[in-house]
Amino acid sequence: MITAGKPHPSRWIYLGFVWMTLLLVFVPLATTVWVAFFSNKLVSFPPEGYTVSWFAQALTLEAFRNGFLLSFQVAVGASLVAVCLGVPAALAIARHRFPGRELINTILMSPLMIPAIVAGTAIYIFYIEVQIRSDVQFAATVYGLMLAHTLIAIPWVLRLLVASLSGIDPAIEEASLSLGASRITTFVRVTLPLIRPGITAGVLFGFIASFGDLEKSLLLVGPGRITLPIAMVNYLEYRADPTIMAVATIQVLIIAIALIISDRFVRLGRTF
Amino acid sequence: MTAIETIQAPSDGRVAAGKRGRSLAPYALSGPALVFVSLLLMLPLLMMLRLSFNKYDAAQMYIEAFTFENYVRFFQDEFYRQVLWTTLWISAVTTVFCLVGGLAVAYFMARTTSPFLKRYLIIVIVLPLFMGNVARTAGWIILLNNKGPLNFLLERFNLTDGPIQMLYTSGAVVAGLTSVLLPFMIVTLNSVMNNIDVSLEEASLNLGASPLTTFRRVVLPLLMPGIFAGSILCFILSMNAYATPVLVGGPQFNMMAPTIYKQMTAIMNWPFAAALAFMLISLTVLLTVVSAVLFEGAAKRTGVIR
């Protein structure tokens, strides 16, 4: 705010409100992390003491270990496939003007706009219809999940790569072309090295978006194949104890690390 | 070569069209991604729409038909009308709270003189956007519990006799959703706020307007596009929320997203679930379009945009 000479009394109310709002965002997350260290199994306040044993306990629970492995596997696969599809698409959107460009861009960004629970339901119905007709199972398989999660990652890859490409002067590519390099050589030797930070950020954001997804995956998981967020919700519906808070803390840590790494490639503050 | 072509490019606004303008390259490049999204999202959505006109049959899931009975049932059944109503009012209240809190925080972030806050506050706000809402909703379960810190403090200071039931109430759902969605609002408002010239406010203050008047008469009108975009985003996301109503609202609290999931899994009435899902998505789109039209009309009248 501008300090225009004399401080206004309402300024304190305003500042108080700002920090209250920020607390509303952060207190729940802080509570989750805090409770993960409580020594009493039944959560009550104030805590009887502190321990780190719930983290070890969390690692022994099979539902969470498998959930973590599945989520990790799906997120890695989905973000890599999304990059393979997204890099050429981003080149088309950022470097060409052609009829239908807006429409194609809207369709490729649509997984971000269409409500996740609706999309998840539609994909599940689609998988089952395919299975009835061709006997190929997608629902409740790793590949089915990976395909659906690729959908989650594509808009992020596209958004970050288009931003990255529009920051690069096309004249550099044109210089390469006019000096006799083929389009493919130009892409591999000139464009690709220039957009590498964008690609890395695209993979990381695709990973993060897929790793944290709950709603799209709800119907697509099967017995014994449950992603980490769904395993967490299933557990939380019955118990909110320090063990699940430890699991949540680990999940938050993984995502935070991925975000800090991405911040090195694209300034988070400027991407939004 | 290309530079000259660019300069001489047709004046229909397609800068840099050049000779590549009519080539098939962009279609070939975007083709794979386009086919992927169409096949895995557009086609399934159409199939879901078709399924919503089928008849439910307990023995074989559904019978091919073309009937509106699933939609008729939705509007006739008191229970589902109630679910829709709850979803709508919870989303509306959540959006208003997000807007009020978001305005304060976004304004503070844009106008703070501390370089430390300027650099790190936005990162700290962006982080929760990607944390997934399960970890934060878990925190709310603890906070609002009968044995949670809020009830502990209330009893400690003798404000209440016994614990107050806070978990499993609609207030809890609104609080949880507001907390989860606030970062979306703040980030949206912040991006618009950054483009507003400080000197406009300084001029208003110099001419004797109070800070509140300056905010209301100068900043707010300029912020309208951000307010609109942020509110739409928060409203859509809370209309479709799953984790918060399930975990903080409890099993008796029904909103649209959990109801669709229940219809698909526990009740196995797919045509009706498809109709519910289609109602949800079309209602979301309809409200977005209507408010966009209303907003544009209002903005033109007040001269915010020309």
Image: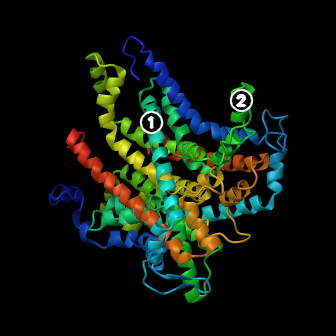
Does dot 1 land on a helix, a strand or a loop? helix
**Residue A247 image position (x, y, % from top left):** 73, 50
**In the rendered image, which quarter contains the N terminus of chain B?**
bottom left
Which image quadrant is residue B191 in? top left
Left or right position of B76 against B61: left
**Residue B115 image position (x, y, % from top left):** 48, 26
Task: Name the one closer to the observer, B247 or B305.
Answer: B247
Left or right position of A86 against A36: left
The amino acid on which the numbered mark 1 sits, given as a three-letter code, is: Val
Which mark, by number, is residue A119?
A: none
**In the rendered image, which quarter contains the C terminus of chain B?**
top left
The amino acid on which the numbered mark 2 sits, given as a three-letter code, is: Leu
Observer able to see residue B45: no
Badge 2 is on which residue?
Answer: B153
Task: Give the answer, above or below, for where B250 lies relative to B206.
Answer: below
Compute the Cα span from label 1 to label 2: 27 Å
Which image quadrant is residue A113 in? bottom left
Task: Give the answer, above or below, for where B131 lies relative to A102.
Answer: above
Residues marked 1 and 2 touching at CB (< 8 Å): no
Task: Name the one closer to the observer, B99 or B194.
Answer: B99
Q: Earlier in the sequence, mark 1 or mark 2?
A: 1
Task: Name the one closer to the observer, A248 or B178.
Answer: B178
Residue at 78% in and 47% down: A241
Which chain does the residue under circle 2 lie in? B
**Residue A139 image position (x, y, % from top left):** 62, 76
Badge 1 is on which residue?
Answer: B100
Q: Residues within 10 Å of mark 2 (few under 14, many from 20)?
A: some
Does dot 2 land on a helix, a strand or a loop? helix
